[in-house]
Image (cartoon, rainbow, N blue to C red):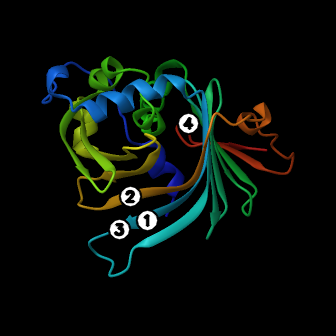
Amino acid sequence: MRPWLLVVLCALGFGCGRANVSAAELNSVVASWLAAQTNIQSWSADFTQTRAFKSLAQPLTATGHVWFAAPNRFRWEVKHPLPTIAVRAPTEMLVIYPRLKRVEHFPLTGGQGGQWRDALGLLEAGFPRSQEQLQAQYDILSYTIKDHTCELVLQPKSAAARRMMPQIRIEFDTNDFSLRATELQFVDGSTMRNDFHDPVINPPIDEKLFAPEIPPDYKNVEPLKGKEHR
């Protein structure tokens, strides 16, 4: 299982379309949550990631920590069971496997970068800067409120994205509007859920987290180009 890849493959493009929930129909709690996002410049939390497959009786789980800095920088660090780090750098996404001494490079510029640029939207979906931004990328299918938790069900507007991931669910606290969970639904019926714990809003974040130094003995791989080099 590569949990980092499933984390980032949530928003595969921008498109045109009609939102199923108009601005006038948005619940006031949802509107307040959207307004609160403008105050978030950085965020970090522990997470528990649960991957469920129809073919497996028990889901697969992983734990780790995530850092986010507006507008789109992030670092996902899976600590257990297999240490893996995914970092969005300015021109590429890095996926680092410390035990294997391997780092994969996915470009975010040029022709090959188009898919990956649009693929790094999970945390941006959790932290939209405005209602307009959210509805430009997703159709809002529904929202429900229960026990101080609001659940938004989103559908990517891109047809290509929907063929891979029909729905995204976002859960946030209706008291302080903090992000509680995200869940991705895939076309094969499998799901991946991230539950966030002990979140910190606007913590100071060391810039080095988003620019990790790669040890000289690591193998560098460019999967999209089929290249490997030291």
State which tag comes first along the sequence, 3 or 4.
Answer: 3
State left or right for residue 205 relative to residue 178: right
User: Does 135 appear above or below 97?
Assistant: above
State which tag comes first along the sequence, 2 or 3.
Answer: 3
Q: CA distance from mark 4 to mark 2?
A: 28 Å
Res. 213 mark:
none
Q: CA distance from mark 2 to mark 3?
A: 6 Å
Do the numbered discs 3 and 4 sit on residues whose CB atoms are within 8 Å? Answer: no
Q: Nearer the viewer, mark 3 or mark 4?
A: 3
Q: Give the labeled residue for mark 1.
A: 50
Q: CA distance from mark 3 to mark 4?
A: 31 Å
Q: Residues within 10 Å of mark 4 (few under 14, many from 20)?
A: few
Residue at image point 35% right, 33% down: 12
State which tag comes first along the sequence, 4 or 2.
Answer: 2
Do the numbered discs 3 and 1 sit on residues whose CB atoms are within 8 Å? Answer: yes
Q: Which residue is more in the foreground, 114 or 206?
A: 206
* Residue lying furthest bottom: 57
**Residue 162: in sight, yes or no?**
yes
Q: Amino acid at mark 4?
A: Lys
Picture coordinates of residue 148, whole percent (x, y): 33, 51
Q: CA distance from mark 4 to mark 1?
A: 31 Å
Res. 192 mark:
2
State left or right for residue 166 relative to residue 210: left
| Local secondary structure at mark 4 | loop
Q: Give the labeled residue for mark 4.
A: 225
Q: Amino acid at mark 3?
A: Ala
Q: Amino acid at mark 1?
A: Thr
Q: Give the labeled residue for mark 3.
A: 52
Do the numbered discs 2 and 1 sit on residues whose CB atoms are within 8 Å? Answer: yes
Q: Residues within 10 Å of mark 1 (few under 14, many from 20)?
A: some
Do the numbered discs 2 and 3 sit on residues whose CB atoms are within 8 Å? Answer: yes
